[in-house]
Image (cartoon, helix red, strand yellow):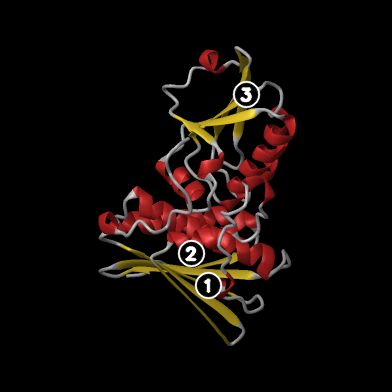
């Protein structure tokens, strides 16, 4: 099953519409709040990256389609910006540095890829195509390997 | 969805309490920064209440980083309360959590925080 595709101008103003689309899909799939949040966050961060760094705020198009199968909920995002594979450009946060000394760039891609259960990217015919995947089940037995620091409050 | 984060601030017992309401995104973060940064340093302690912030992206982390830097410069402390599990996840997976004083809202009385 898949939703109707969205074709939007690549602007920050489109991000709300993308969020609504993703949350609608997550709702139809019956995803709990936590994985719904992760899917929305990943779509938000990757779309923002395309707008800000892919098209560099010049006019362009973002095409989004989402759907679900028995095991997964997925979003496919396409753009015509220069080739960019988020997975190959992932920079881990500089957790060894005090916060005040860190550069902020790259956190969005790290967050997006950390949030997803699976991610793939391809480039063909001058289009970037990214597929974002969240599993519909087994959220309780996910390995707790995504934390960058001690979650215990000071 | 709301297109800006509402900022309400008050000074209580020598503590500046800043309540935020709304989603902190790449759309809303610039206006939020303009409003929240001047509040840092007004008192020795700033208590930021995030209990009405249901969503934060990396743009929100950038805002928190600027708050942290301003607080260091002003030699004041910043306490965050009311973090949802999702906001904790975003802060934790980027190594932000350990750099903030994070407390339970219910147990955080501004009067008791005064130095």
For the residue pair B1 and A35, the one nearer the viewer reads as A35
Residue at (66, 70) in percent of width and height: A54
- Residue A142 picture quarter: bottom left
Per the model, the C-alpha gap separating discs 1 and 2 is 7 Å
For the residue pair B11 and A37, the one nearer the viewer reads as B11
From the top left corner, tell me how far across and down residue A98 is, in percent. 62, 47
Q: Which residue is identified by label 2? A: A113
In the rendered image, which quarter contains the C terminus of chain B? Answer: top right
Q: Pointer 3 indicates a residue of which chain? A: B
Q: How crowded is mark 1: few (under 14 residues within 10 Å), some or many (20 or more)?
A: some
Say whether residue B97 is visible. yes
> Mark 1 or 3, which is nearer the eye?
3
> Mark 2 or 3, which is nearer the eye?
3
Q: Is residue A144 above or below residue A91?
A: above
From the top left corner, tell me how far across and down residue B59 is, in percent. 61, 50
Q: Pointer 1 indicates a residue of which chain? A: A
Q: Which residue is identified by label 1? A: A87
Residue B45: mark? 3
Q: In this view, does A91 lie above or below A103?
A: below
Per the model, the C-alpha gap separating discs 1 and 3 is 40 Å
Residue A57: mark? none
- Secondary element under disc 2, as helix, strand or loop, is helix
Same chain shared by disc 1 and disc 2:
yes
Contact (Cβ within 8 Å) of mark 1 with mark 2: yes
Left or right: where B49 falls relative to B72: left
Q: Pointer 2 indicates a residue of which chain? A: A
Contact (Cβ within 8 Å) of mark 1 with mark 3: no
């Amino acid at each position: 099953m898949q939703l109707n595709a969205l074709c939007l101008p690549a602007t920050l103003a489109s991000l709300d519409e993308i969020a609504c689309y993703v949350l609608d899909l997550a709702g139809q799939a019956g995803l709990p709040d936590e994985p719904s949040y992760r899917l929305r966050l990943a779509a938000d961060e990757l779309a923002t990256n395309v707008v800000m760094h892919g098209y560099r705020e010049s006019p362009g198009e973002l095409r989004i389609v989402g759907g679900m199968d028995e095991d997964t909920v997925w979003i496919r995002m396409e753009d015509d910006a220069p080739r960019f594979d988020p997975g190959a450009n992932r920079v881990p946060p500089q957790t060894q540095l005090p916060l005040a000394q860190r550069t902020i760039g790259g956190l969005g891609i790290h967050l997006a890829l950390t949030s997803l259960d699976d991610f793939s990217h391809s480039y063909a015919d001058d289009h970037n195509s990214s597929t974002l995947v969240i599993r519909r089940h087994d959220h309780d037995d996910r390995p707790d390997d995504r934390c960058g620091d001690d979650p215990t409050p000071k | 969805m709301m297109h800006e984060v509402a900022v309400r601030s008050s000074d209580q017992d020598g503590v500046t309490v800043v309540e935020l309401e709304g989603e902190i995104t790449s759309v809303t973060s610039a206006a939020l920064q303009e409003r929240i940064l001047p509040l840092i340093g007004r008192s020795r302690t700033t208590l930021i209440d995030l209990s009405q912030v249901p969503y934060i992206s990396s743009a929100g982390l950038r805002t928190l980083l600027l708050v942290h830097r301003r607080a260091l410069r002003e030699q004041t402390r910043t306490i965050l309360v009311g973090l949802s599990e999702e906001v904790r996840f975003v802060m934790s997976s980027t190594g932000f959590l350990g750099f903030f004083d994070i407390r339970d809202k219910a147990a955080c009385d501004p009067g008791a925080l005064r130095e």
